[in-house]
């Protein structure tokens, strides 16, 4: 089942397999904190690349939880930015 969530930010970490990977954090409509692990060497990274430049607070749809986990988003989800937050909207509080 797909759901929407608010994009909260990114953490960049060194990978044990070389290079870097990203934790991308989200909060769903129930207030649950969720994350996805995105690694540039994996095929599904193209789904997550746009979030490297997305502003916190954007609303994202097309997400699915990873089976067997309460707080992980399936890396094979097809996320779509539904509502993008621009920098000036944050400063003005819109």
Image (spheres, rainbow, N blue to C red):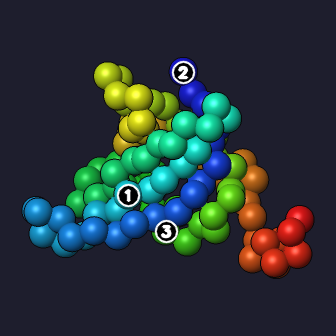
Residue 79 image offset from top left, x and y in percent? 55, 45
The residue at 55%/71% (across/down) is 53
Label number found at residue 1: 2
Q: Is residue 52 left or right of residue 45?
A: right
Q: Quadrant of the C terminus?
A: bottom right
Q: CA distance from mark 3 to mark 1?
A: 10 Å
Q: Nearer the viewer, residue 13 or 39?
A: 13
SS for dot 2: loop
Residue 70 image offset from top left, x and y in percent? 41, 29
Residue 78 seen in the figure: no
Q: Which residue is mark 3?
A: 52
Pointer 3 or 1: first along the chain: 1
Residue 8 in the image: above or below residue 87: above
Which-is-in-front pick, marks 2 and 1? 1
The residue at 54%/21% (across/down) is 1
Q: Which residue is mark 1?
A: 23
SS for dot 1: strand
Q: Is residue 80 left or right of residue 25?
A: right
Give the crowd class for mark 2: few <14, some 14-19, many >=20 residues within 10 Å: few
């Amino acid at each position: 089942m797909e759901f929407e969530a608010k994009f909260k930010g990114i953490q960049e970490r060194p990978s044990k397999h070389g290079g870097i990977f990203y934790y991308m954090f989200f909060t769903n409509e129930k207030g649950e904190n969720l994350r996805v692990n995105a690694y540039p060497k994996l095929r599904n990274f193209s789904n997550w690349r746009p979030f490297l430049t997305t502003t916190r607070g954007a609303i994202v749809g097309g997400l699915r939880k990873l089976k067997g986990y309460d707080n992980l988003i399936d890396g094979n989800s097809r996320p779509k930015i539904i509502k993008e937050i621009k920098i000036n909207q944050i400063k003005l509080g819109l």
